[in-house]
Structures are given as C-alpha cells and as structure tokens.
Amino acid sequence: SQQGEEDPQALSIQEGENATMNCSYKTSINNLQWYRQNSGRGLVHLILIRSNEREKHSGRLRVTLDTSKKSSSLLITASRAADTASYFCATDRGSYIPTFGRGTSLIVHP
Amino acid sequence: EAQVTQNPRYLITVTGKKLTVTCSQNMNHEYMSWYRQDPGLGLRQIYYSMNVEVTDKGDVPEGYKVSRKEKRNFPLILESPSPNQTSLYFCASSPRDRVHTQYFGPGTRLTVL
C-alpha cells in the first residue's frame, strides 16, 4: 500500500535556486526518510527524521516534519546540476517494512 | 569499500525458467531486504531478513523466494518467472541499530518474456 506521496511529481529549476519537495502520508509514523536516486541506480539515504522531531539539517538539505498535517518537506538550497535525480520519501510505523512514495523527479539546469 | 553488490545487473529470460539474483553486502549488516521498482509505483518491498535464517514477507512476496544462510548473502529466487515480474530489483542492507538507514545495491533489471 502506498503511504508516502511526493509532490510535485516533477520539478525543473535553475542552478543556484532552492528546490522544495513535499511528502504526505496517511497514517501515523515512527520515522520518515528521504532518499535520492540517480537515473537507473540504487537509492542513497539522505536523512531520517523521527516522529518526535520537527526539523533536521544535513549540509544543503533541510527536512521538516509536521505530524499534525502528516507531511514532510525536503529543501535543497543552492541547487547544483549534480542534484538532478529522483527523490523519494519512505515512512515506517515501527515495522521493518518501509513504504516508499512514487518520487519527485528534480532537474537542475546548469 | 563498503557496498552492496547484485548479480546479474541485467537479465532477459523466458517465462517459467527459474532464476536467482544474488545480493551480497560486506558491512556485516543484520538487516537485508529486496525491493522491486516499477514506473509510477515507487519501491515495494518483497522480502526482508533480520538475520541469518530469519526471513519475512514484505508487501509483494508472491512469486518470490529468499534465503539467508549466511549473514552477507540474501539471494532472490524466482521459481517460475512471469512477465509481470519484469521490473528493476534492488537489494538493500542496514545495521541492526539503524535498520531504517538502508544501503542499496545498484539494481538488477529483469525482463521476462
């Protein structure tokens, strides 16, 4: 069953701009994670945020979590062409079966 | 180098011909899992394993088998592949204390004719 849903499905920006993508989910969660996938390759874990956290940072990444709205956002600041990829959120409810969304495809134009 | 490897990377086969996709990790991780990725559907978990000889079903286990005889290896077996199993498959692993921070393999693109 699809739990996380990313929005927008596709995002096209210029290098240097910020990119924001959102993830909404339906039921309560324990953790939410963001992954990046370059075309046809394996996913790379970016950041995990727990249900009792509201914001986390990692380099140019900022993730927020609003459990009352059942949503999360991933902000990439000062984007680079190398950030071009698909970004997925994944949620879990304490089980070992994470549920991934369909992803946001980000294109950063040089 | 810490990594998850999968073999083969690409495979074209015919309906009903048994196949195995191997997965190996060199990070001494307890947790391993298999996913399939289909356009418009995201990743869906097929099976996972918490440790040697411990496996359990994910969201879409039908038509697949797994085994975990050694900690480092977690092969995915398709006893009788069908065209609806054409997909991109990923193996992943993670340590027991950070089970949700998964390291993914490069993927295996399988086509069943």
Image (tube, coloured by chain):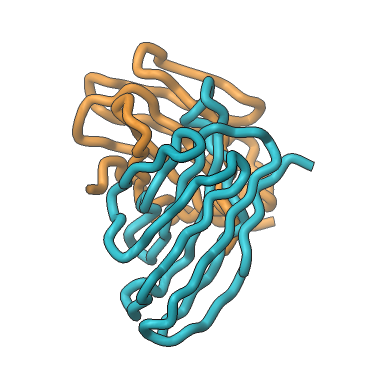
Chain colours: A orange, B cyan
Q: Locate residue B91 relative to residue B85 in the image: left or right.
A: right
Q: Is residue A57 above or below residue B76?
A: above
Q: Quadrant of the N terminus of chain B?
A: top right
Q: Locate residue B94 relative to residue B5 in the image: left or right.
A: left
Q: Position of residue A25 (x, y in %)?
A: 26, 36
Q: Is residue B113 above or below residue A30?
A: below
The residue that appears at 28% across and 49% down in the rendered structure is: B59
Camera-side residue: A27 or A80? A27
Q: Quadrant of the C terminus of chain B?
A: bottom left
Camera-side residue: A12 or A74? A74
The residue that appears at 48% across and 61% down in the rendered structure is: B89
- Give the total number of marks visible in the rendering: 0
Q: Position of residue B67 (x, y in %)?
A: 46, 51
Q: Position of residue A47 (x, y in %)?
A: 53, 29
Q: Using the rendered view, name the quadrant where residue A66 is placed.
A: top left
Determine the residue located farthest toward the left in the rendered image: A27
